[in-house]
Amino acid sequence: MARSYCDAVAALNTLQSNFSVVDAIRKSGKGMNKQAIPEMIDWCRRIGYEPSDFDRLRPIHIAGTKGKGSTSAFISSILTQYLPSSSSPSCFRKVGLYTSPHLRFVRERIQINNEPLSEEIFAKYFFETWDRLEDSARAKDEPTDTTAKPVYFRFLTLMAFHTYMCEDVDTAVIECGIGGEYDSTNILTSPTVTSITSLGIDHVAMLGNTIEEIAWHKAGIMKPGVPAYTALQPPTAINVLQERAAERSTSLSIVAQHSELEKVKIGLAGSFQLSNASVAIATAAAHLRSLPNPPPLPSPTFLPKEFIRGLEDVRWPGRCEIRRERDVTWFIDSGHTLESIEAAASWFASQIPPNPTSPPPSTSNPPNRTPRILLFNQQTRDAPALTRALHKTLVSALNNDRPFTHAVFCTNVTFKDQGYRPDLVSMNTSKEIVDALEVQKSLQRSWKELDEMTEVAVKGTIEEAVEWVRELASTRKEKDATALVTGSVHLVGGFLEVLETGMRDDGSG
């Protein structure tokens, strides 16, 4: 087998669960695999580690429904301010950040000092992990095919831990994948701190369909004697979290918004990021407090300069991001749950000037109305419910029952000729449903029920949807069109790939 980055991505994609397997799990009602942790421990041993070995990474463990990626990014950005420099005390040499999913490149998931692994380094540690698993299989006289490796997310988790151990990372921020109790990352035995971001209803087939059930799963990352923090939650969720903290012999602190954030221009847009930033402040402070010689730490009315700089410098693409090019301004957010879609809609409404109030029914889109366009997809969740939440929030925020003049619904396939970019291949959706545009046609019907005057299109790829928006925007020269891109991390990742690889002739984008 060749050993390039492209070869690594191709091999990794063979570990994805196909649609039939994923669909069977969803329909079975069995929920999470309760043997996940023993199985993951066995995989660790096959590549030469015991879970306690990862104590050396001084890990920080983050769970939640909304904002866990952003919160992890805030924490990493804060802690990297304490790398060796002339202006701050040095506490670390290398800070790891493990998150999921990725936007454009799978190597984004495994970062050191806020930089994704290079293609060369990713391939090196990928094949080291791959080879160790195959060697273990041979030693046990087992096949060395894909059954000798864990599934996609578990493999990347193993690889991340292996990478951080080999690279002598001395602090690692680890974001859970799904849930907490049975998540692959929950083999960590002694994190310095655990934190739970805002909770909502998501992954109901595996975690349950109530906030209490979901809180139970998320609280599974708590460890005895390890400080635990949570964002503000509904009272019933707080009750569950507190019960779980007591079971785990630890204390739970509820984090309110830090008073000093009103004076800080944090690097991520959206008012909801203030909650994530506050949890990050408390978590980073607890981690620093665990060091032998901690630096000056925050108080309720004070933030050290390193914390302020970390909050301001953080970057997390695809979250409340704005891109401008000729004729169109793109507003991009990867919201994909009801709550995060509502937050994305509120952010979008706060960024745009109001269009004229709704025209009479006889005039679909009068010439003087600036195009306001929705580009949307959600392939696996209740997509129509998400669009209804989006529409309702924008109608209220904009005081206009026609928030968009146009809408385009597309699949997550990246390009019309090449198909998916290799890093963005998804095998856990039905190819037949994607090819037939079933979800997109359903969204078209759903949106027409909400606003029959919106001009709606369906496209087979993200590239074609972007071309459709650009062509529409180019016909209205008096004002730039605005377009909201949302509904899925996979959509946003593919969208950014199309923008980055197909820049406009004038060099904008």
Image (tube, helix red, strand yellow):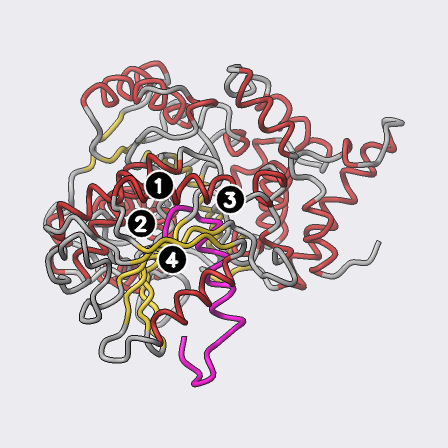
Earlier along the polypeptide chain: callout 4 or callout 3?
Answer: 3
The numbered mark at residue 57 is 3
Q: CA distance from mark 4 to mark 1?
A: 27 Å
Q: Kindly check if marks 2 and 1 are in contact, taking CB atoms under 8 A apart as contact.
A: yes
- The residue indicated by pointer 4 is 316
Q: CA distance from mark 3 to mark 2?
A: 17 Å
- For the record, the magenta segment spans 486-509
Earlier along the polypeptide chain: callout 3 or callout 1?
Answer: 3
Q: Amino acid at mark 3?
A: Leu
Earlier along the polypeptide chain: callout 2 or callout 4?
Answer: 2
Q: CA distance from mark 3 to mark 1?
A: 13 Å
- Residue 116 position in % (x across, y down): 53, 60
For the point 44% across and 49% down, the residue is 489
For the point 31% across and 65% down, the residue is 322
The relative height of residue 308 versus residue 131 in the rendered view (above or below) is: below
Q: For residue 61: magenta?
A: no
Is disc 3 placed on a helix, strand or loop?
A: helix
Q: Amino acid at mark 2?
A: Pro
Earlier along the polypeptide chain: callout 4 or callout 1?
Answer: 1
The numbered mark at residue 294 is 2
- Residue 331 position in % (x across, y down): 31, 61
Is disc 4 placed on a helix, strand or loop?
A: loop
Can you name the residue that lies furthest to the bottom here? Answer: 506
Count neighbours of disc 4 (C-alpha within 10 A) and say few if under 14, some if 14 to 19, many if 20 or more. Answer: some
The relative height of residue 332 versus residue 28 in the rendered view (above or below) is: below
- The residue indicated by pointer 1 is 290
The relative height of residue 253 versus residue 505 in the rendered view (above or below) is: above
Can you name the residue that lies furthest to the front here? Answer: 362
Left/right placement of residue 297 relative to residue 20 reads left
- Residue 285 position in % (x across, y down): 28, 46
The relative height of residue 475 versus residue 123 in the rendered view (above or below) is: below
